[in-house]
Amino acid sequence: MNRTRLLTTMALFVAIGTVGAQLLWFPTGIAKAYPVQHAVNVMAAVILGPIPAVIIAFVIGLLRNLLGLGTILAFPGGMIGALFAGYFYRWTKKKALAATGEIIGTGVIGSLLSVPIANIVLGQSAGALAFVPGFIVSSCTGAILGVFVLSRIKQHTLVPNNIQS
C-alpha cells in the first residue's frame, strides 16, 4: 500500500472520530462517553493495524483537546484501546476480539490509568470506581458500533489488510 493512501485513510478516521465525538456522546458519571472514538479505534485497528490505530487515537485526542472538546483523559483510553484492538485482531483475525481488545484496553486499563492523570493534571481526586463504569459503557457501545460498521462494508474497497505496522 502506498503512503498517500495510508495517510488519507488515517486522516479520514481522524475526521470521523473528531467530528463524530461531538455528535454522539452521553454522560457517564464524572466523565463523558464518546463511543465514536471507540468505534474508530476498532475500525482502524482492523483495517490498518495497531500502530496506525494508536496514531489515529492520539491525533483525535489532541484535536479534541486543542479545540476544547475533550479532556486529557482521551489519551490513555483511546490509545491503549486502539493498541489492544489492533493486536487482538492481528493475533486472531476476529473482529469480535478486536472489540474485546478495545474494551479491555480502554474500559479497564485506560480507565485505571486515568485515575492518577485526573488527580495530577485535572486536580480531581476520583477513585478508580469513578472512571471504570463510564469507560466500560463507552468502550462497549463504541466497539459494538465499530464491529457493526465493519460487518457492513466490503473490506477490499477500503484498504488492503497487508499493511506492516
Image: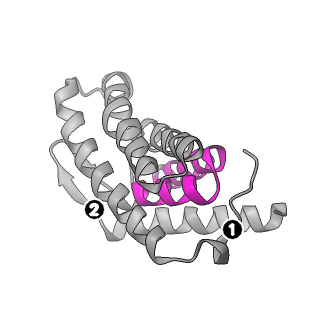
First to last magenta residue range: 37-64
Give the residue at x 40% y 53%.
96
In-image side of 133 versus 148 (left or right): left
Between discs 1 and 2, the one toward the N terminus:
2
Seen at 71% across and 65% down, the residue is 160
Which residue shows up at 49% across the image and 49% down it? 61
Q: Which residue is mark 1?
A: 159
Quarter placement of the N terminus: bottom right
Q: Which residue is mark 2?
A: 25
In this rendering, does residue 148 appear at all?
Answer: yes
SS type, badge 2: loop
Magenta-colored segment: predominant secondary structure? helix
Inspect the magenta stretch and tell me whether residue 39 lies in it: yes
Q: Circle 2: is it few (<14), some (14-19), or many (20+) Cα within 10 Å?
A: some
Question: Which numbered disc, 1 or 2, marks the residue closer to the eye?
Answer: 1
Q: Position of residue 71 (x, y in %)?
A: 38, 44
Q: Position of residue 133 (x, y in %)?
A: 19, 39
Using the rendered view, name the quadrant where residue 86 is placed.
Answer: top right
Q: Is residue 157 above or below residue 93?
A: below
